[in-house]
Amino acid sequence: MTAYVVFIKDGVNDQAELDQYNAKAGASIAGHPLKPLAFYGPNETWEGPAAEGLVIIEFPDIDAAKAWYNSPAYQDAKVHRLKGATYRVMVTEGVG
């Protein structure tokens, strides 16, 4: 079943660290079957705290999403995301 990884950026702490994250995260997708569906486009918060930005990535299934997220390349990038910004990250399965 299709899975979706959602990143919600709540705020930036260190832009230099976030820049390193962006470069490394982009390189981490090689060899993984993913499809970006939304990538920091305009967003409107209807309920709850406003988000600075969000990303939605589609994977063929939750195992593929976990394989990318847990890959050494993404884990190396993640260190910089954690230093550079406050995010909420989640995965969910699609319908059907």
Image (cartoon, rainbow, N blue to C red):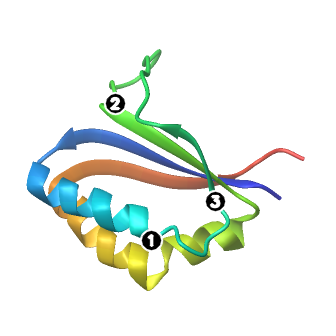
Percent x, y of residue 49? 33, 26
> How would you rate the neighbour count of disc 1 (Cα within 10 Å): few for under 14, some for 14-19, many for 20 or more?
some
Front tag of 2 and 3:
3
Horizontal side of residue 88 vs 65, given as left or right: left
Q: Is residue 89 above or below residue 37?
A: below
> How would you rate the neighbour count of disc 3 (Cα within 10 Å): few for under 14, some for 14-19, many for 20 or more?
some
**Label 1 element class:** loop
For marks 2 and 3, give the CA distance. Answer: 23 Å
Residue 14 in sight in this render: no
Q: Are marks 2 and 1 in contact (CB under 8 Å)?
A: no
The residue under label 3 is which amino acid type?
A: Leu
Percent x, y of residue 37? 60, 40
For marks 2 and 1, give the CA distance. Answer: 24 Å
N-terminal label among 2 and 3? 3
The residue under label 1 is which amino acid type?
A: Ser
**Residue at the (38%, 49%) spot, across then down:** 88
> Hey, which quadrant is residue 40 in on the image?
top left
Horizontal side of residue 48 vs 71, given as left or right: left
Q: Are marks 1 and 3 in contact (CB under 8 Å)?
A: no
> How would you rate the neighbour count of disc 2 (Cα within 10 Å): few for under 14, some for 14-19, many for 20 or more?
some
Which residue has dot 1 on it? 28
* Quarter that holds the N terminus: bottom right
**Label 3 element class:** loop
| Label ID, residue 51 | 2
